[in-house]
């Protein structure tokens, strides 16, 4: 009897492997805060936050994808950023609050991967010395 | 999954695998729990004890974040996954500086992380602050979030038509929004029934939110503002003379795209200004006065006022008279200050809420304190013994490090920076090994007759609250009193 669940698990694994191979996969990299790279291969259609969590990439997702925080802030390569649909105003509002914002910043939970992600590097923002917080007014140079 | 490059976790494990480290964290809010979670992630063979002044963990997640923002509150579950680690202990209801001193912690642990946030209100220091119907934002927020120290707050909304909120940060908007929720919306939150009874069917017509500087310098985020404008019961209004004074050349510069040196500051300003251009405008004083005197047909006018400093509060014929100094902006872009003009006015209202920010305070004379900024004296999270030397083994995370600014994201970022700097100290062999001092701490608390809640007790409380909530179709029903919480011991 004990072998039955194991057999079931094996069947599920085989099935999921088969079904996964029938949907399109894409391979790309996360550049971690310590500059190491994490290679991920994933079916298209998932968002960057989900993929990061499945692959133990250290990306926070404090609000469970409800567009209430910007802890899953990621930086995309410009070429890729330009090809993606524009973020909705609510995502832009949260990017306003993200520290280390760049012109190609997005929220990981709002970006679904597709073929365009093949071989790209998604950068996680670094905790730098001079991160900006709400109300911080930098001096002009 | 293939990892390239350096991997911090395995490096520290390699160097120290057989020698245990023990860390104390003061405060169980976002900064403290985030720090605990990431220390466990990054370093092998460690013990972490989290000390919390309240009985219940998670600090501002439970008692600060708005009760209608339940999704973001779920971050607590993620942060509290640390309790699955047998080397993690929680001491809820223990005040560091009083029940256990900083010196004792320094002796008991390899390192101490200060993450106790900002627990007092920035003072306004004006005459009349102590009058009835004048509250601090902390009182109000803790009241509707069922904090044991504030759930009995003496407050009622009978005949309270006009409310003034001094300060224009996100907390001010949270309070205005909660005050305007209808009964159905209130029932979906975890606000307790006593507070709901007081809030529902209130007679608020106008909420005037007052900022010292101009519109561009206002502190609330567009995210909060946009969310509130989507609720049909609120009508947002601006006052024309405020706008004329607010949008001087310098403030317009603060909204220009000035490149990367300005981070997202100018971008945020620009987008907020653009959004607020769609608000209705009150043309003159006569229109303003008539709006403040009339009912609002079921909607609440949220009037955003700028360039006003409160001078004093007086009670006249059952009304609070808030005397305001009019200001203009002076100084260079990004460093503009409010300069008083030779003009004052009176705002008549029924309730005043002071929401000018929180402040950290020194809980133990042995803490190196920066009294200018009201934070623990630190350099990028490393606490300083004196201006030139670090107090190795002592670190600051979150608001106690940076001052009470920013949202949870910036708290995470600032804590992350501290952890990186701490790990450098570990790599440099500056942190001493200490075996788990759990027994010693428990004995100390027993000797001093201090009741505390651990994670097992918290789990029972949490389960109970959620179970009670499910019966009433609410996220949870919070236990409001310490004696009820302590019954779970």
Image (cartoon, rainbow, N blue to C red):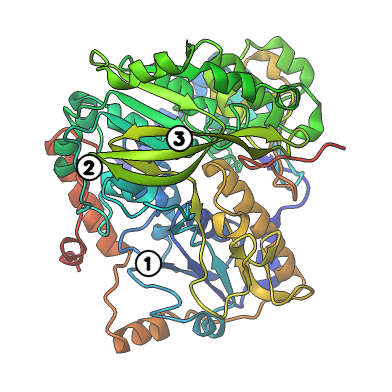
Where is the N terminus of chain A found, in terms of image quarters? top left
Is residue B6 or residue A93 the one in the foreground?
A93
Q: What chain does mark 3 sit on?
A: A
The disc at residue B38 is none
- Residues under labels 2 and 3: Cα distance? 18 Å
Q: What element carries label 3?
A: loop
* Residue B480 found in image quarter: bottom left
Q: What chain does mark 1 sit on?
A: B
Q: At 18% from the left edge and 64% from the top edge, which residue is drawn?
A: B488
Q: What element carries label 1?
A: loop
Provide residue B364's location: percent of width, then percent of height.
Answer: 50, 77
For label 1, the crowd category at 10 Å Cα-Cα, with few meaning under 14, some 14 to 19 and many 20 or more, is some
Q: Do labels 2 and 3 share a chain?
A: no
Q: Are marks 2 and 1 on the same chain?
A: yes
Q: How many labels does the image show?
A: 3
Residue named by callout 1: B53
């Amino acid at each position: 009897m004990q072998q039955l669940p194991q057999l079931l698990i094996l069947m599920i694994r085989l099935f999921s492997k088969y079904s996964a191979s029938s949907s399109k996969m894409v391979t790309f990299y996360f550049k971690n805060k310590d500059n190491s790279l994490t290679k991920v291969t994933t079916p298209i259609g998932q968002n960057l936050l989900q993929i990061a969590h499945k692959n133990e990439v250290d990306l926070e997702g404090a609000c469970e994808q409800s567009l209430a925080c910007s802890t899953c802030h990621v930086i995309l390569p410009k070429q890729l950023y330009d090809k993606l649909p524009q973020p909705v105003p609510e995502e832009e509002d949260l990017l306003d609050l993200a520290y280390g914002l760049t012109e190609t910043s997005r929220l990981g939970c709002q970006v679904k991967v597709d073929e365009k992600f093949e071989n790209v590097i998604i950068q996680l923002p670094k905790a730098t010395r001079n991160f900006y917080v709400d109300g911080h007014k930098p001096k002009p140079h | 999954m293939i990892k390239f490059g350096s991997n911090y976790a395995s490096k520290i494990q390699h160097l120290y695998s057989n020698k245990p480290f023990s860390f104390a964290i003061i405060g169980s809010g976002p900064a403290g729990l985030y720090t605990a979670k990431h220390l466990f992630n990054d370093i092998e063979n460690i013990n972490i004890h989290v000390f919390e002044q309240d009985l219940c963990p998670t600090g501002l997640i439970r008692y600060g974040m708005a009760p209608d923002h339940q999704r973001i509150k779920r971050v607590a579950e993620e942060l509290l996954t640390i309790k699955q680690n047998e080397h993690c202990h929680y001491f809820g209801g223990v005040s560091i500086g009083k029940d256990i001193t900083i010196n004792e912690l320094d002796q008991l642990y390899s390192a101490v992380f200060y993450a106790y946030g900002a627990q007092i209100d920035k003072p306004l220091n004006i005459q009349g602050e102590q009058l009835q119907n004048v509250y601090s934002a902390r009182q109000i927020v803790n009241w509707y979030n069922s904090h044991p120290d504030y759930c009995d707050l003496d407050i009622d909304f009978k005949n309270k038509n006009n409310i003034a909120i001094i300060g224009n940060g996100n907390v001010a908007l949270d309070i205005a929004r909660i005050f305007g929720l209808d009964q159905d919306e209130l029932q979906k939150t975890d606000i307790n029934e006593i507070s709901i009874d007081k809030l529902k069917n209130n007679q608020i017509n106008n909420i005037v939110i007052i900022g010292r500087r101009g519109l561009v310098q206002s502190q609330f985020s567009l995210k909060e503002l946009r969310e509130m404008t989507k609720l049909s019961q609120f009508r947002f209004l601006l006052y024309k003379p405020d706008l004329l004074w607010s949008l001087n050349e310098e403030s317009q510069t603060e909204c220009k795209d000035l490149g990367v040196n300005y981070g997202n500051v100018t971008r945020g300003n620009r987008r907020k200004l653009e959004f607020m251009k769609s608000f209705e405008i009150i043309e003159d004083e006569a229109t303003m006065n008539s709006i403040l005197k009339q009912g609002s047909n079921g909607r609440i006018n949220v009037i955003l006022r700028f360039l006003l400093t409160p001078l004093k509060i007086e009670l006249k014929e059952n009304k609070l008279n808030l005397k305001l100094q009019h200001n203009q902006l002076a100084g260079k872009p990004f460093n503009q200050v409010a300069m008083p003009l030779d003009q004052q006015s009176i705002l008549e209202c029924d309730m005043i809420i002071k929401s000018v920010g929180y402040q950290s305070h020194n809980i133990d004379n042995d803490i190196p304190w920066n009294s200018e900024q009201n934070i623990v004296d630190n350099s990028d999270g490393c606490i300083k013994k004196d201006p030139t030397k670090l107090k190795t083994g002592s670190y600051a995370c979150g608001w106690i490090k940076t001052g009470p600014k920013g949202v949870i994201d910036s708290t995470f970022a600032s804590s992350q920076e501290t952890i990186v700097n701490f790990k450098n100290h570990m790599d440099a062999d500056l942190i001493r090994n200490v075996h788990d001092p759990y027994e010693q701490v428990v004995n100390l608390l027993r000797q001093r007759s201090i009741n505390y809640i651990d994670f097992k007790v918290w789990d029972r409380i949490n389960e109970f609250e959620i179970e009670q909530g499910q019966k009433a179709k609410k996220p949870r029903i919070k236990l409001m009193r310490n004696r009820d919480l302590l019954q779970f011991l």
